[in-house]
Image (cartoon, rainbow, N blue to C red):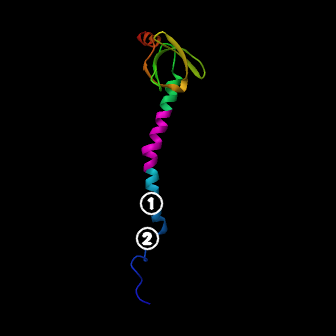
Amino acid sequence: MGPSPAGQTSTAPSWVNFVPLLLMVFVFYFVFIRPQQRKSKELQNLLGSLKSGDKVVTSSGIVGTVVSVKDRTVSLRSSDTKIEVLKSAISEITERGSSESSESKS
């Protein structure tokens, strides 16, 4: 019955083995998941405030002015072309319509 090998004796509780795993999950959530949720929420607010006269950029790179807004689609005028795209294709509003700026002056 000689001395037991040094690698087999452990005085730490078994839950200590899960601490690194929990730490990785915590970091993963705050680095990847939470910022993506925030960005998604901001995009939904942006699409909800979309109105006629706004200048927008679509995810495919089309730049145009909003002519009309429907439930799921938006009509854009880009140069001499009028196209209809899904609201989900709008990636950003570059300039707000003139009707909002005239309201803020009053």
User: Residue at left 47%, top 38%?
Assistant: 36
Boundaries of the magenta span: 27-40
User: Residue at left 44%, top 39%?
Assistant: 35
Q: Quadrant of the N terminus?
A: bottom left
User: Mark 2 or mark 1, which is nearer the start of the sequence?
Assistant: 2
User: Residue at left 46%, top 13%?
Assistant: 97
Q: Give the amino acid at mark 1.
A: Val
Q: Position of residue 15 (x, y in %)?
A: 48, 65
Label 1 CA crowd tier, 10 Å (few <14, some 14–19, many 20+): few
Q: Position of residue 55 (x, y in %)?
A: 45, 16
Q: State the SS at label 2.
A: loop
Q: Position of residue 83 (x, y in %)?
A: 54, 16
Q: Is residue 6 above or below residue 21?
A: below
Residue ID for mark 1: 19
Q: Nearer the viewer, residue 56 or 48?
A: 56
Say whether residue 34 is magenta.
yes
Q: Nearer the viewer, residue 78 or 47?
A: 78
Residue 12 circle label: 2
Q: Is residue 92 above or below residue 36?
A: above
Q: State the SS at label 1.
A: helix
